[in-house]
Amino acid sequence: MRSVAAIAIIARLTLREAVRRRLLWALAGLTVVIVTLTWWAFSRIADASPITGPVEMLGVSQVTVMLAFMFSFVLAMTAVFAGSPAIGPEIESGLLLAMLARPIRRSDVLLGRWFGLASVLVVYALVAGYLELGAVDLATGYVPSDALTAPWYLAGESLVLLTLAVVLSTRIASVAGGALAVVAYGLAWMAGVMGGVGEAFNNDVLRGAGTFSRLVLPSDVLWRGTAGALTPPESVLAAGGVANASLYKFSPFSGAAPSLEWLAWCVFWVVAMLGLGIVLLRRREL
Amino acid sequence: MTAREVLALHCELAGLPRADWQPEIRAAIDLVGLADRADGRTGTYSKGMQQRLGLAVALLGRPNLVVLDEPTSALDPVGRQDVRRIIGALRDRGATVFLNSHLLTEVERVCDRVAIVDHGRVVSELTMAELGLERGVSVRVTGLDGVGRDLAARYGPTRVDGEWLHVDGIAETDVPALVGRLVAGGGAIHAVVPTHHSLEERFMALLGATSEPAVGDAADPAAGIEPAADGPADAAPPSTSDEARP
């Protein structure tokens, strides 16, 4: 119970710092700009070619997925840049040592930091995600197959990267840890594309590489879930001329809802990584 | 964050009742002399002010044991004096202050007991009195013959270093009488400088003793000190502290 209270205190402190460092204001401002631009761009598309048939709808869906990909990239970067300095600078400045003189454990500090940053990212992902999908709907009338779930996948993807960045910050300097996390994110995405190619052409080696990469860093699992949720239903795809849906899957802007097993793996991965972070922090000389 | 917010956070982490926060914070801020800047951002604080804030954090909740690691580093002379005053106030309140420092002159001024650690091992743990930081006097005197010098020996062990005559262990009240006897013995006095064995000298002597086991039984701190004090300390150049060196 004492531990829960300590985690809540650190999470609140993290939120307060996010407000003070204008992170929340910057995210809110960016959201307004992006949503406005999205509405404007999709309105122009709808003006040029009314979204009446499946082909137009497929086109709009692909632009929506591309937009979501850019947003997922922004979210991933936000998670990495927010998570990389979560622990290291606190140790270097001696603040953590002073804090740990109180009845509070190192694990409380790490989990408090994670929960504080995670709440910022989840709220940002959901609010911005739904507003963007709302703007697309308003401008074109296009509603993806699973619009309600898509922003949750994005939020989950940002949590995976936040976890990686926070764990790295227990041992590695902020800049180096951030760079490592970004590179890992890029590699995971590339491996996901390779896995998609393996899936489409039935190549076991490529499929295995994709699966291995998703086990090591499951961010691509959730990205593919986002893309799948934003893709039109199969009937629309077929009507739009995408006869072979499995071939379509190798596109980096396509996907499908992840299985329950994969979702469970994502949750387990986050929990296990946080556990690893706690062990690393406990063993670190302050 | 402001200093007040940092202190409020520590009150919360320490589990102090909320009603006590404000009085505790006010008392801590006043004690460390940060009242004028308590609402300023800590990011704009000088190193010395950050040290004061760190002290204020340590004082919250009126702890019975305070552990301070190099509390005077980066502080100006006024700041160092303030820290000494704060430590004195803590001691008067009945708290135990564990001070870790490489600034031995600070330790000498503040501490009642000293533990000397070498390579992670406590080589000596004694009171300041037991450390034998005895005082003495150095007199620059010319025209004094051997008999005159022997006169000084009644006040304590003497050593001659050029024109300097060092008398260890002499009581401060006996210094005028010593000077009178030297003048009566035909000596011309050019300077009289009070001296004392600094903790630093004792520290070096103790480390010398522990690194040379043949000098004494290292397991017995007292046994280790005495031979060393008579050995390396006496063999060193004028046995005065840095401040008092003529």
Image (cartoon, coloured by chain):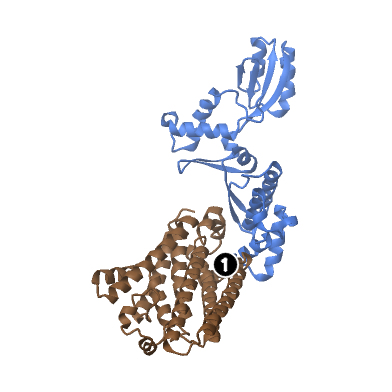
Q: A107 above or below B226?
A: below
Q: Position of residue A140 (x, y in %)?
A: 52, 86
Q: A41 above or below B106?
A: below
Foreground pick, A103 / A135: A135
Q: Colour of chain B?
A: blue
Q: Position of residue B110 (x, y in %)?
A: 64, 43
Q: Is residue A229 left or right of residue B168?
A: left
Q: Quadrant of residue B210?
A: top left
Foreground pick, A93 / B17: A93
Say which residue appears at 61% left-offset and 63% top-offset. Answer: B10
Q: Amino acid at mark 1?
A: Thr
Say which residue appears at 37% left-offset and 81% top-offset. Answer: A256
Say which residue appears at 29% left-offset and 76% top-offset. Answer: A200
Quarter the N terminus of chain B occupies? bottom right
Q: Position of residue B138 (x, y in %)?
A: 66, 22
Q: Colour of chain A?
A: brown
Quarter the C terminus of chain B occupies? top right
Q: Quadrant of residue A146?
A: bottom left
Mark 1, residue position: A14
User: SS of the residue at dot 1?
Assistant: helix
Q: Quadrant of residue B140?
A: top right
Residue A2 showing in the rendered view: no
Q: Is residue A125 left or right of residue B40?
A: left
Say which residue appears at 44% left-offset and 60% top-offset. Answer: A168
Q: Chain of mark 1?
A: A
Q: B100 above or below A257?
A: above
Q: Position of residue A235 (x, y in %)?
A: 37, 90
Label 1 neighbourhood size at 10 Å, few (<14), some (14-19), many (20+)? many
